[in-house]
Image: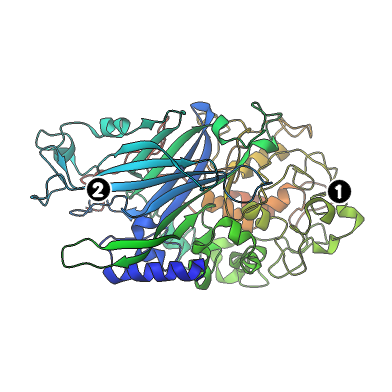
Amino acid sequence: MNSFKKAVCSLAGLLLFGSSLMASSHREAPLIANDPLADNTDVYAFRSPDDPNTVTIIANYIPAEFPHGGPNYYTFGENIRYEIHIDNDASVPGDEIVYRFTFQRENEDPTTFFNIRLGAQNLKTTYTMERSTDGGASFQVIISDGIVPPNDIGARSIESGVGLGTTYADLMSGAISMTGDGEKVFCGPVDDPFYVDLGGIFDLGNSPRQNGPNKDALAEFNTHTIAIQVPISLLLKDGAPASPSSILDADYVIGVWASASRPAVRTLGAPGEAPEDSGEWIQVSRLGMPLTNEAVIPIGMKDYWNALTPYEELEDTLLDEFFYNPELALYMDDDLFGGAVPAFAQLRIQRNSLGAFDFGFGQDGLFPLKGSDAVAGTALDDAVFGTLLLPGPGKARSADLWPIFHTGVPNFPPYQLATGKGGNPLAEGKPFINNFLPNGGDMLRLNMATPITPRDDADFSPLGIVQAAVLGLTDPRFNGTADLEFIPNMDGFPNGRRLEDDVTRIELQAVAGVALAAIGLWYDDFDPDTGNPVTQDLIDVLTYSTGVEANDKPFSNSFPYVAAPWRGTETDEQ
């Protein structure tokens, strides 16, 4: 039985006993939507702003938790393997490092219907953390009985003498553990750090909303996070230098993804008895890049995508087609269905870039250059990276969207800023990204050598690499030379993902061709006589906004950086 069929059987069994938990956004696939405790919602990976010798990785689970969700509050599930996977070596297929978390729950006082009373918790949750450095072949326990804070139910439950008699801040700080090798760990409920107008987006692309105010659909909702802060030295591949050779050192690239797995068989017991799980472990959810399964993979393939690992996905050319020609591109083209989605009016794809290249849905993109002298010695040359980037005709976005999601982007022509190219988009230009790791599919790729943009820096922007490109092309501090230098926000999405990054906006801009423009494949209104790339089409794409541009709570300045969960007695929903 293949992994997809196993996942279907496993989740079908879960449907038999159902779930009392409400689930909403982040429910990327139909089957996992019925199993919220195992549902990945987001993955983040960034150099820690207050500890630059470490990388913080955050994997969130359980979508749209009501803070006032009694009597059965959300918590991590038992009989689920929550895993964070790390790939650091392109020459070796599969993961190099895996962190595994399993959770145990205890009723400390089964005589009450309250979740917290007189110092007792129901359900009190603890965890075991294991680490594998051989790709999952063997695991070592590095934390036992780790503390998971309870939900922040309310003042009487947390602070009063008839509750726990403490503060929630103390509960969170007391739940941070340290391993013997220097990893810092936190598992527990937090404010959901993702911000997006889900109501508008899924109302046939009505974002920003054409009538009525935009709304962060995840404001005042919580999620459960697994956050680990890991010394960079522990994440480097074997043989990598202790210090990077440059701020884009290829030896410092890692790929990060998270998953949840359940036993293949669930047997229901007598009334009041817990079900019995058995059989091999089956992956039922996974996540790397944000919004892939939500907004790129069509409904009919979402469960299939969820059951694959990134390494299996890389071998599956069927899924590649959704990146070569994403559905969203249909609504950013006036020759197709652009007029039907007025909210995307500012987002228009290059149909005649430089008078020669058509990146519209089903068009050839850069494929007409395949095998020509123009691409010789570039990443588009079959002799350099094989047929990865120009696999065939009719695959319009094989050279930009597909590598962003599936290989990372190399610091190699043409993937450098147009600064210094002299009008030739295929020439060498100003470097601004290198997170190339081509041996897996959808992963969040991070170059750990890239410096940190301080969060209080005037140049810090939630537009990540898009803003770095803007500065590298237009700011006199950076556009006077094609030399490699740090440009603020080179450490932003899609070079990893910071909590602040506006990934919805960035990905919509990317579908609209902003990455192509950054390397010199300008929008159709570019005038070669003036040579000015700052055209109205480019301005429109860069100034596009969904109307939701920040999280509902400020992030913390220290690990685990996410905001404390909403209290069950303080949201506007009540």
Foreground pick, 313 / 57? 313
Q: Position of residue 1 (x, y in %)?
A: 50, 71
Density class for disc 2 (Cα within 10 Å; few <14, some 14-19, many ≥20) is some
Q: Earlier in the sequence, mark 1 or mark 2?
A: 2
According to the picture, the residue beneath numbered tag 2 turns out to be: 105
Q: In the image, what residue type sits under mark 1?
A: Gly
Q: Is residue 42 visible?
A: yes
- Residue depicted at x 36% and y 32%: 177
Mark-to-mark CA distance, 1 and 2: 58 Å
Q: In the image, what residue type sits under mark 2?
A: Arg
The label on residue 319 is: none
Foreground pick, 381 / 364? 381
Q: Residue furthest right?
A: 373
Query: SS at mark 1?
Result: loop
Foreground pick, 506 / 354? 506
- Residue depicted at x 35% and y 59%: 36
Q: Position of residue 30 (x, y in %)?
A: 42, 68
**Which of the 4 quarters of the picture holds residue 11?**
bottom left
Q: Position of residue 186 (x, y in %)?
A: 37, 37
Q: Is residue 196 visible?
A: no
According to the picture, the residue beneath numbered tag 1 turns out to be: 377
Look at the numbered discs 1 and 2 and tell me whether their residues touch, using CB distance below 8 Å: no
- Residue depicted at x 78% and y 62%: 352
**Which of the 4 quarters of the picture holds residue 334?**
bottom right
Q: How is the image coloured?
A: rainbow
Density class for disc 1 (Cα within 10 Å; few <14, some 14-19, many ≥20) is some
Q: Position of residue 144 (x, y in %)?
A: 33, 37
Report the mark closest to the observer, 1 or 2: 2
- Residue depicted at x 69% and y 35%: 248
**Which of the 4 quarters of the picture holds residue 331?**
bottom right
Q: Is 493 left, or right, of 569 in this rendering?
A: right
